[in-house]
Image: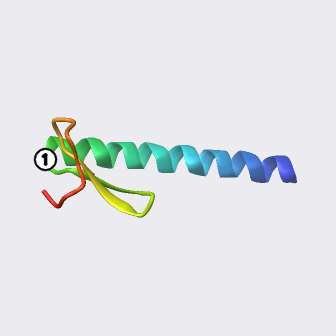
Amino acid sequence: MDVDLYEFAAKVMLLANRGAKKAQEENHRLGLPNVYSIEGRTVFVMPNGEIKTEWP
């Protein structure tokens, strides 16, 4: 039973990570930054790779 639960959780994480990666790629394709919170600070990663801490 436990093995099935861990296998299911691993599959869910795999699918979630794939979806997040696709969303990040689409944001950059549309010229939008990806937004993260790192240690409580908002960080913007621009499509050109530039990292900003101020709203772009």
Q: Nearer the viewer, residue 7 or 24?
A: 24
**Left or right side of 30 for 27:** right
Q: Nearer the viewer, residue 36 or 22?
A: 36
**Left or right side of 13 for 2:** right
Residue found at x 83% / y 46%: 3
Give residue 22's quadrant in the image.
top left
Q: Residues within 10 Å of mark 1 (few under 14, many from 20)?
A: few
Q: Pointer 1: what residue? A: 30
Element under label 1? loop
Relative image position of residue 18 (x, y in whole percent): 44, 43
Relative image position of residue 40 (x, y in whole percent): 42, 64
Considering only vertical position in the picture, is 41 above or below 2? below
Residue found at x 12% / y 56%: 56
Residue type indicated by callout 1: Leu
Residue at the right extreme? 1
Residue at the bottom extreme? 40
Give residue 55's quadrant in the image.
bottom left
Q: How many callouts does the rendering have?
A: 1
Residue found at x 17% / y 40%: 47
Q: Nearer the viewer, residue 19 or 28?
A: 28
Relative image position of residue 29 (x, y in whole percent): 16, 41
**Left or right side of 25 for 3:** right
**Left or right side of 39 for 34:** left
